[in-house]
């Protein structure tokens, strides 16, 4: 455990909850959780699962009915066909990613992570004895890994390339052309696996979605596609993720899961079937609301000298570059970096953001705009008031 630390985003949420217990209200702009309710038809499906007595153990990797729903989703939305033996459900996408790393990484094996990256990737890799290899991306490239950067990062110890699109924390979305160019770099290196973290797939603002296996079906023996219902259906607490990939890898993940958590919640599986099969008629309204919130945050950034941000194409985060603000005349004494600025904003603006250092990008802050719109607007006004020169 000396290799890793606690999740920085969870730490922010814990601090907000602790303050609330003392009567101090802090707006949590650090948690990757939509404020929307789980759609009613999904909740009803979960209740019906209870009423039917679906409260016992299931197969470790999920019920046949759930796997059929996952197969339908991949075929309908991505044009990819899987067999049941190539599919596994788990207690959230996070568990499945960890199990995939644990099943495949030996001491010293390397995993290429485009930075900024989701905070949990590096520690998951370190827990297995592997080594995360961060490859910095830039706002100028839309926060997307470029082929030449990938090529430079590859070594004989490279075991995985992780691609998260839409991305956390930047909201970057890789196009089919982007993915094709990156995957071509891996031609001739059959031992390098690809992890496609597609958890934010439907949360996009007018841009199309592609996933690696859709672009390169010939790579199906080494691509693991991970997804879930936490972001797509506001089901974070239900803890249900799924993955599909080579049967040898899914079987290994199944063994790991059988000796740790066993099957995901039987009730959550029943709810997830409805989430995956029934049309997401609610999604258009959600995206309209999120687009309004995105505009509120981008306006806030534009009003504060020294702050800048790239408008995200997906997810519900704005990744804010605060380096010019830190280097200018704006910050009070004692604020030298993004970690200090995040702590200062909690005190001065009652707003909790996550330092970019946690995502492998010092000098930035991640703001999650997945909260009630009026609350977001008021909190952004407090941030403007705190950051503007006196």
Image (spheres, rainbow, N blue to C red):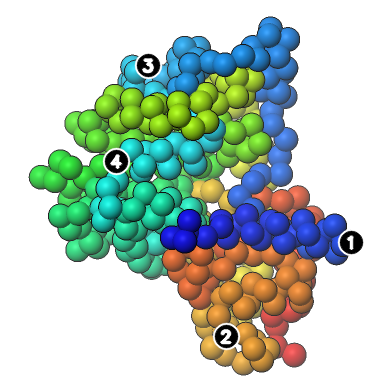
Specify few, some or many for label 4: CA neighbours under 10 Å numbering under 14, 14-19, or 20 or more: some
Q: Position of residue 339 (x, y in %)?
A: 58, 74
Q: Work out whether residue 287 can be spotted.
A: yes
Comparing marks 4 and 3, which lies closer to the viewer?
4
- The tag on residue 336 is 2
Which mark identifies residue 84? Answer: 3
Classify 386 as above or below 107.
Answer: below
User: Mark 4 sits on what residue?
Assistant: 104
Q: Position of residue 343 (x, y in %)?
A: 67, 74
Q: Earlier in the sequence, mark 4 or mark 1?
A: 1
The residue lying at 57 percent from left, 68 percent from top is 355
Spatial separation of the CA atoms under disc 4 and disc 3: 21 Å
CB contact under 8 Å: marks 2 and 3:
no
* Residue for point 66% across, 23% down: 42
- Taking depth in this image into account, of 192 and 306 the one nearest to the observer is 192
Q: Secondary structure under badge 1?
A: loop
Residue 122 lies, with reference to residue 356, above or below; the image says above
- As drawn, the label of residue 23 is 1
Please report the residue visible at 45 percent of the width from the left and 26 percent of the height from the top.
Answer: 258
For marks 4 and 3, the one nearer the N-term is 3
Task: Indicate the quadrant where residue 222 lies.
Answer: top left
User: Looking at this rendering, what residue extends furthest in the left direction?
Assistant: 188
């Amino acid at each position: 455990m000396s290799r890793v630390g606690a999740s920085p985003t969870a730490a922010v949420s814990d601090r907000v909850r602790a303050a609330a217990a003392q009567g101090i209200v802090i707006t949590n702009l650090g948690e990757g959780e939509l404020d929307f309710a789980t759609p009613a038809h999904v909740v009803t499906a979960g209740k019906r699962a209870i009423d039917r007595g679906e409260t016992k153990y299931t197969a470790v990797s999920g019920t046949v009915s759930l796997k059929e729903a996952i197969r339908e989703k991949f075929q309908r939305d991505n044009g990819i066909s899987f067999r049941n033996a190539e599919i596994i459900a788990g207690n959230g996408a996070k568990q499945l990613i960890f199990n995939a790393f644990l099943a495949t990484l030996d001491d010293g094996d390397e995993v290429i992570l485009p930075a900024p990256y989701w905070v949990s990737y590096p520690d998951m890799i370190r827990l297995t004895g592997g080594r995360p290899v961060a490859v910095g991306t830039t706002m100028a490239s839309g926060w997307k890994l470029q082929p030449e950067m990938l090529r430079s990062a590859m070594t004989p110890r490279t075991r995985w390339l992780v691609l998260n699109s839409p991305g956390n924390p930047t909201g970057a979305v890789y196009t089919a052309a982007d993915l094709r160019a990156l995957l071509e770099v891996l031609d001739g290196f059959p031992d390098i696996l690809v992890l496609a973290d597609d958890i934010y797939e439907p949360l996009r603002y007018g841009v199309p979605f592609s996933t690696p296996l859709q672009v390169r079906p010939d790579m199906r023996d080494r691509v693991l596609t991970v997804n879930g219902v936490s972001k797509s259906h506001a089901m974070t607490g239900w803890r249900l993720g799924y993955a599909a990939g080579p049967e040898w890898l899914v079987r290994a993940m199944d063994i790991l899961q059988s000796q740790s958590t066993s099957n995901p919640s039987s009730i959550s599986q029943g709810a997830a079937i409805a989430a995956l099969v029934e049309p997401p008629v609610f999604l258009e309204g959600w995206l309209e609301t999120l687009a309004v919130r995105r505009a509120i945050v981008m306006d806030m950034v534009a009003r504060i000298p020294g702050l800048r941000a790239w408008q995200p194409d997906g997810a519900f985060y704005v990744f804010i570059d605060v380096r010019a603000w830190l280097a200018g005349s704006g910050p009070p004494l004692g604020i030298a970096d993004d970690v200090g600025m995040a702590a200062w904003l909690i005190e001065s603006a009652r707003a909790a953001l996550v330092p970019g250092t946690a995502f492998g990008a010092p000098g930035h802050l991640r703001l999650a705009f997945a909260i009630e719109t009026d609350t977001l607007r008021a909190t952004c006004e407090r941030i403007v008031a705190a950051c503007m020169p006196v």
